[in-house]
Image (cartoon, rainbow, N blue to C red):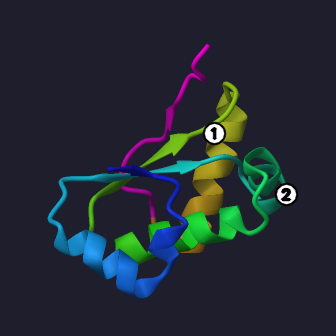
Amino acid sequence: MLTNGRVLSRAAYAEAVVRLGLDEIVVRVHGADAARADGATGVPGSFRQAVLGVAALSRRKQAYGLELGGPPRSAEERREILAAVERAVGQAVQQAVRQVQPRP
């Protein structure tokens, strides 16, 4: 499942998704902080919600990965995004970050 992770920040929804028994849930993150991610999505609070969604999956022992939305990222920015999510979740991200190439 690919998601922006925002709805997973609601405990009941996260629990229902985990009960589906999916092999993996991939959360797309658009920046290393609220200013960049919210700016990219145009939705205030989207970064916080996405990170809370990842944390909800982690607490429920659900396999997840991260995907970077938006334009291609430098190696430094990818590390920044990964570190930001890991700080929020309180542990290492389960799967390496992968970059999505925007469709033409």
**Which span is picked out in magenta?**
92-104
Between 94 and 67, the one lying in front of the other is: 67
Magenta region includes residue 34: no
In the image, residue 103 above or below residue 95: above
| Image quadrant where one finds the C terminus | top right
The residue drawn where x is 55% and y is 66% is: 6
Which numbered disc flags the more N-terminal residue, 2 or 1?
2
Res. 60 visible in picture: no
- Drawn side of residue 42 relative to residue 65, left or right: right
- Give the residue at the far bottom of this rendering: 12
Between 24 and 90, the one lying in front of the other is: 24
Q: Position of residue 29 (x, y in %)?
A: 59, 50
SS at mark 2 in the image: helix
SS at mark 1 in the image: helix
- Give the residue at the far top of this rendering: 104
Q: Residues within 10 Å of mark 1 (few under 14, many from 20)?
A: some
Residue 13, by quadrant, is bottom left
Q: Position of residue 39 (x, y in %)?
A: 83, 50
Q: Which mark is residue 78?
A: 1
Mark 2, residue position: 35
The residue drawn where x is 71% and y is 39% is: 77
Q: Position of residue 54 (x, y in %)?
A: 47, 66
